Image (cartoon, grey):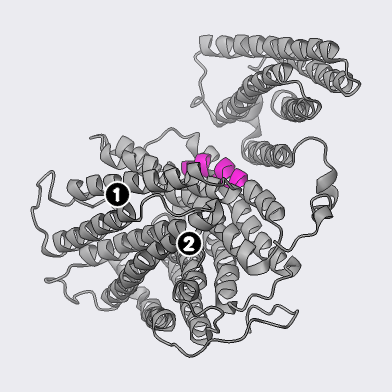
Amino acid sequence: MSGDPDSAADDGWGVLGELPGDLMMWVLIVSELLVFGGALLAFLAVRAGDTAAFAADQALLDQTAGAVNTIVLVTSGYCAAMASAARNVDRRDTARFWLYGAMALGCVFLIVKSAEYWSKAQLGIGIETSPFFTFYYLVTGFHALHVVAGIAILGAVARFDGERNIEIAASFWHMVDLIWVLLFPIIYLLG
Amino acid sequence: MKYESQKIAYAYFLAAMILFVVQVSGGLLAGWIYVAPNTLSEVLPFNVVRMLHTNSLIVWLLLGFFGAAYFLIPEESGREIHSPAIAYYQLAILVLGTLGVVVTYVFDLFQGNFLLGKDGREFLEQPLWVKIGIVVAALMFLYNVSMTVLAGKKTAITNVLLIGLWGIALLFLFAFYNPANLSLDKMYWWYVVHLWVEGVWELVMAAILAYLMLKLTGVDREVVEKWLYVIVGTSLFTGILGTGHHYYWIGAPGYWQWIGSIFSTLEIVPFFLMMVFSFVMVWKGRRDHPNKAALLWSLGTTTLAFFGAGVWGFLHTLHGVNYYTHGTQITAAHGHLAFFGAYVSLNLAIFTYAFPIMRNRDPYNQVLNMASFWLMSGGMAFMTFVLTFAGTIQTHLQRVMGQNYMEVQDQLVLFYYMRFGAGIAVVLGAILFVYAILVPQREAIEPGKRDVLSPAE
């Protein structure tokens, strides 16, 4: 190869090269935002065609549970950020403590979410019930799967607790709570 | 050529090119049958011609991939192929299977026989014995290349290539599962058909492209690898759930319409990245490689794949659009440019790069080869346009106005004539390509001295 030694540092990625964590994680984050963004835009477009039916279905959602989960997940994101900050100053046990906190709150989110799904199932509501619920289950279901994946990733970096690893996991976890913060108002609250 | 066993690729590429000419000739015949539907209707019915056209395409592309793997793996992992003998036996099995398929289709032998007769599923029509042969050949191949890579240097290019080739073999196993329920049949059928061309084949494409960029532009391996990972990540992220765009109307649950629409829309991303990648590498590259034809095909493959697979795919991938366009000539337009752009051109790029090296006449000026690029690409682009127009009219008359199928076909005959003309250009281009690769001897040139890279000169 005809490369010069310092080309690794400056390989022409510009601002992309300065992102924290790993480039691949940012590729994933952007991809996820495109998918959820696309789904939410499609939701809004279909909703515009039949606002009355969407409003009637939305009234069946538990907005309080959604609000609780918002607080839970954002707090969990705070824990992940604290873990990263603690690890950066070499306080590894403190970092691990914050990671476990983030994971525990992730579990709380899943429990609340499961209770919501359960109560919908009791009403005989499923993914094929109406266009609103098709989107509801697709978007929140995909999101819940990401919460599960996020908990696993946080668990992995609690074990392999390199500075960079924790940064990468925290980036993923913030993406998961960012998406919730976007989908909660659009699906639960939008009047 | 650094390693003796790279020569294995020669036999694979040769077999691939023979099938390539057969494939496009079959396509030309099928194109004529669209114009004059009774042509050979007793001797060689349209459905058989179409089977030969599509099956031989897949087989020669795979032969090209195998050949490419045998060519680039020794260089990448820094050692000879584990066993050249196994590689040649593998080729013999594949050629035997191909001949068996052709004879079985053309003469419709052993109709209904579970082992020897043809199978009814589109694209997977091969008799069971051929399918088993394909698996045996694939296992021999994977054993051979995996042993080579495991014993040698592991690079990002060989890793991605191997994952892609293992994926091809494993997903092919779904060809053996054929549930009686037609919806389930289709669901698993796409595990092979879609997850090949919009999944693992993209990994193979990205790996071969990365190798070509490395060799032709002289950009640092680190940079190439970073791009490779991003391309592979996005193609798996979008391609796997993108399968949903085949589940709209086969009896699968309705939520697939949204999963398919959203994920398959994003399938354009890896193709866009591959195009940007190839052009950025050429701009940044400090090497003036004399094999301009290989560079032309490399840039051609990413550009045509972006339009054929990416743009033309998006054209009819949203379920609201596909409700009207499904199975019209729009699909044919997309299929032709996507396969030509992504996989035919990629194969021709690696052939163009490898042949002068294998025949010891590198560096080499390939004017005829470049002419064949423009002839084939021009023909294929024209074909894509006329089929798109035909498909648009067909969609309107048949799906919106509700006219019946054959009535509409009569309205499209002008486009079918033009498509036939475009097909002639493609076939001539293919023959010219093979000629340019194999025949001329006295075009060797001095290594490039200029700084400027002008791939399309």
Residue at the spot x=50%, y=73% of the render? B357
Stretch in magenta: B232-244
Residue B370 seen in the current view: yes
Residue at the spot x=71%, y=23% of the render? A188
Magenta-span inclusion, residue B234: yes
Taking B402 as reference, is B205 left or right?
A: right
Q: Main secondary structure of the magenta part?
A: helix
Residue A38 in the image, given as x and y percentages of width and height: 66, 41
Q: Who is closer to the viewer here, B207 or A52?
A: B207
Taking B147 as reference, is B59 left or right?
A: left
Which SS class for mark 1? Answer: helix
Find disc 1 in the rendering and name its residue.
B137
On screen, B188 above or below A185?
below
Q: Residues within 10 Å of mark 2 (few under 14, many from 20)?
A: some
Find disc 2 in the rendering and name its residue.
B3
Taking A43 as reference, is B107 left or right?
A: left
- The quadrant the C terminus of chain B occupies is bottom right
On screen, B335 above or below A60?
below
